[in-house]
Amino acid sequence: MTPDDDTKEQAPKALLETARYAQLAGTWIDAARLTEIALLARAQLLTDPFDFDKYPDLKAHNGNAILELAAIRSFWPDVEPLVKDSHNRTDWYEDLAEVVDELGAYPATEDDIQTQARGTLAGPILSDLGPTRIIDFKALGIRWILEFNNDTTTVLTAEAFCAVLQIVLADLALRHPVLIEATVRIRVDVRSGAGKDAYDIDINDSEPEISALAHIPIGPDDPEVRDPSLISLCLQLIHAVHVRPPEDLQALLEPMFRDGLGHKVSVGRPYEEAAALLDDAHYERCAAAARPASSATFRPAVKEHLGPSTRLGPGYDQASSLAAVTERYGVANETLRYTLPRLLADGNGRATIERLRNEGWLDWQILAILVNVAMNWRLHRDGILPHQAAPADVMRLIREPETEESEPIPLDWFSGEQLAMNIAMLPATVGQRWHLRPRQQETQHDTVRDLVVRRYGFAVDDVPHLDLLDCVDQDGKLLPLIGDAGAGADTQGS
């Protein structure tokens, strides 16, 4: 076989593989048109081009296309003409339709197929339809959503940007950056212009969902300008979810560039040229159609090797962590000397502590929450508004020893909003010890706690101590939580 013969054999395979990736991405109309192109190439360049036994990849692709058409016919019949129009030169559509006619109704509900898609597809079903396209994937604990107009130039430019972002993220995954779980929604705006000043991005990270508007000039541009500029936009997005000091991220990036990140992005022809397989009419038909409403339920799956890092984070020191835990037990012993026994003797108070334990909070964390509630009550007692409290006042009141003469703290303070607020604040407070930058998060999902559990020993660091539910003597007095005075009693921690 000559080199030219080898090329002829590989080109149809590459085109079919491209169509297969479009199937997996949920862009099923793109996949149909790319399949048509691959079929035409096979007819010209391969022997026995449609022999399923000889080409098992074609057989598998055919099986997927049958299932896609069956689903479209059952749930989104208005889309079927797009599939038919995509196969305007071969009999592929007619063959698929004949099989689907024999199969009958799709053997599942629309909800079932969308649930299946979340586990098997890399994007929403028919995400190539509608005036705005969507790319939706998850990497390094971050959900990345790219939205852009459904026209030829914008799609190719936005996909090129997404490809650069995914290369950067894959390279960065090897270096375990400290990223906090979030959703980053990026609107890609393609406009005329040239030079590095034409590339810009506006990022709003003041809300739980980070939003960004990326301005990218129509390409392809000079690679020496375009590739570094696209990488720069990506790094700005990553900075928005990086919660350690900026110099930490910079220290990770420098070896990435030395190891050839720029070459990984720029290898081969520009994406906008290599991927320009579909004509303007195709994008116009896709833009005029409607994406299934049920595709809005899509949630990207976590892919192996691209999940959130679980390696111990930079700056973590176990000795320092355990010293801080020990101090928290000591502070609780003094500042809750009379309140903690009252809570444990109260049915609701004891149930609250048991609930927090069942939710995975360690004893020192429960005590820290209770200490902070007590401090907030003392601010209230002294007529100090929390947002006006000086740091010195906070430290004084959080360590204020309880005595027999101290005014009892009402136990209803250890419930409701006061308790919930201090539960939410604790992981962020601990994160500050490791120089983690706080940011907004969804109230129902504690992303800061997730981060300190994964990277900073939050769920495991503890010291031997008395069982929090059994730390009161027969006279109702609080026993020392740590130290020799607890010898012989039930202890926890390690």
Image (spheres, helix red, strand yellow):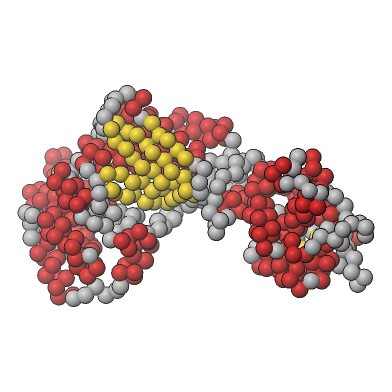
Point 89% across, 69% down: residue: 476
Against 187, residue 232 (above or below) is above
Q: Is residue 4 above or below residue 372?
A: above
Residue 45 appears left or right of 391: left
Q: Is residue 168 visible?
A: no
- Residue in the picture at 64% in, 48% down: 428
* 294 sits to left or right of 478: left
Q: Quadrant of the N terminus?
A: top left
In-image side of 203 versus 340 (left or right) = left
Residue 400 visible, this orientation: yes
Q: Position of residue 378 (x, y in %)?
A: 80, 52
Point 22% across, 43% down: residue: 151
| Residue 391, horizontal then vertical, whole percent | 76, 40
Residue 265: x %, y % from top left? 35, 35
Q: Quadrant of the C terminus?
A: bottom right
Counting from the top left corner in percent of width and height, residue 411 is at: 78, 64
Determine which quarter of the picture holds residue 201.
top left
Front in this rendered view, residue 84 or 132: 132
Q: Is residue 194 left or right of residue 184?
A: left
